[in-house]
Image (tube, coloured by chain):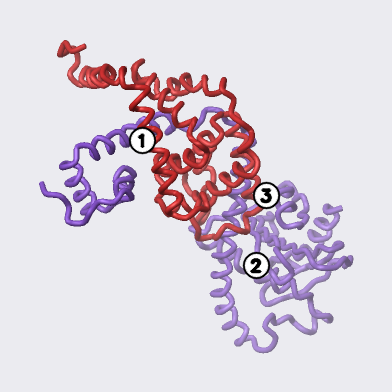
Chain colours: A purple, B red
Amino acid sequence: MTEADEPISDFELHAYVDDQLDMPRRIEVEGYLACNPKAAARIMADLRSRDTLRLALGAPPAHKKPDTFDAARRLERSLTRARLGRQVRRAATAATLVAAGWFIHAQLSPFGVAESEASPPPPAYVEDAVQSHRIALLRAGMRSQIGMPDYDREEIRSATGVVMPPLPRRWRVLDVQIFPSRDGPSVEMAVQAGDLGTLSLFAVRTGHARDVEPAFAQIGDERVVHWRTGELAYALTGSAPARNLERVARDLADRLD
Amino acid sequence: MTRKAAGWTGVDVIGQLGALRRYARSLTRDEAAAEDLVHEALARAYENRAGFRPDGDLRPWLLSILHNRFVGLWRNRKAEQNRLDHLAQLVQRNNPGLGPEATVRVGQIYRAFSTLPDEQRAALHLVSIEGLSYQEAAAVLDVPLGTLMSRLGRARAALREFEGSASAEPRARSAPAIERQRRLRVVGGSHDGSG
């Protein structure tokens, strides 16, 4: 055993103890230690302290409070949603490209509202709502993209400033997502609403307060009822008959009060 | 403990609780205070959640928030001496299989660790216990790599010093004792008669 060609630095002796050297350099350090009993004794003492500390401190503390777990879960959900939001935005770009194909086919305005039916054009956020609904349906068809079916109205409110209504008891929440939209974060929720099929409820905080009664719009294959309560704008999207959709929308609007 | 990631590609905060609690305990030297610190750090992380890069590494991010929280608010809340006295029990509880002499030794080294300055304790914990790379640990502590290394060096020197003085006498006995214990476990009744 010969001494290493390159001198061994103090940094490398630490890195040896902390297992942060690659194998060839480890072997060189070991060659050096084999010839230097003093340095070797020091390293062994450091390894011994390290292992003893690992023994003493490796186990997590036993003192635990449920609050801490709740705080961790809240953070986890929020970070997961942010990450999903990013991924969905990427998917949304793809979806927009697909959609663009349809639109070119259907010509004219990107969201080919049947002009005769919708005298004033629907507000801009309704486009976002429909886009979100389409993505929700897309996601529902992809098994890997499992949503997060927890529906915590209070958490949504504190995270986004958007108030969501309590839902009819028989509805099943399929997915809750926070989406970026032109007016700030929006909430998109997909529900299984019995006979009405899959509906999406979209809500976004707008910059100014205004109450608007529920109004109907047909956008592509989707039917939308949209309304506003103060600063919040809502859109209920689905393929159920217009009259049913409007009835449900009015019911949800009432639940918001 | 590994958990299945939540949803599509979830962010696993709950899986980091162990590391956060361990680090908080090394900083505060008190289990109850550590839990409070972890809770505060999580609340802080939630407030600053926009600062987390979605493709970033969660553990260093959380550890650094916890560290800043400690430096900002906790450093001056001194650990009381009587808290340190509970540590021997803690060590025993965590390692029920340890022989009495080894337990004493572990307690001693923990005591030496506890009396290190905060910066040195933090550096040694992140590298030795959590196994962070030097770069990651320096980023958590927000110091240059050289500063991290010198803290690590001083911490190790202090522990070595402690080994040299405090355990010079018992060391001669405890090492063969541990060795004997280990052999007994493997060979069964066989005894070499030493000690």
Numbered tag placed on residue A50 in the rendering: 1
Whether discs 1 and 3 lie on one chain: the answer is yes
CA separation, marks 2 and 3?
Answer: 17 Å
Label of residue A219 in the image: none
Q: Please, which residue is most extreme toward the left here?
A: A1
Name the residue: 84% across, 65% down.
A228
Which residue appears at 29% of the width and 46% of the height? A13
The reply, left or right, for residue A4 in relation to residue A235 is left
Q: Nearer the viewer, residue B23 or B186?
A: B23
Q: Is residue B76 above or below residue A235?
A: above
Q: Is residue A232 left or right of residue B167?
A: right
Mark 2: amino acid: Ser
Label 3 amino acid?
A: Tyr
Q: Quadrant of residue A246?
A: bottom right
- Earlier in the chain: of badge 1 and badge 2, it is 1
Answer above or below: position of A143 versus A14.
below
Disc 1/disc 2 C-alpha distance (Å):
53 Å
Q: Residue under circle 2?
A: A132
Mark 2 surroundings within 10 Å by alpha-carbon count, few (fewer than 14), some (14 through 19), many (20 or more): many
| Subunit under mark 2 | A
Mark sitting on residue A151: 3
Along the viewing direction, whichever of A138 and A40 lies nearer the viewer: A40
**What's under tag 1, amino acid-wise?**
Arg
In space, the residues marked 1 and 3 are separated at their CA atoms by 46 Å
Q: Are marks 2 and 3 in contact (CB under 8 Å)?
A: no
Q: Earlier in the sequence, mark 2 or mark 3?
A: 2
Chain at tag 1: A
Residue B188 percent across, percent down from the top left:
19, 15
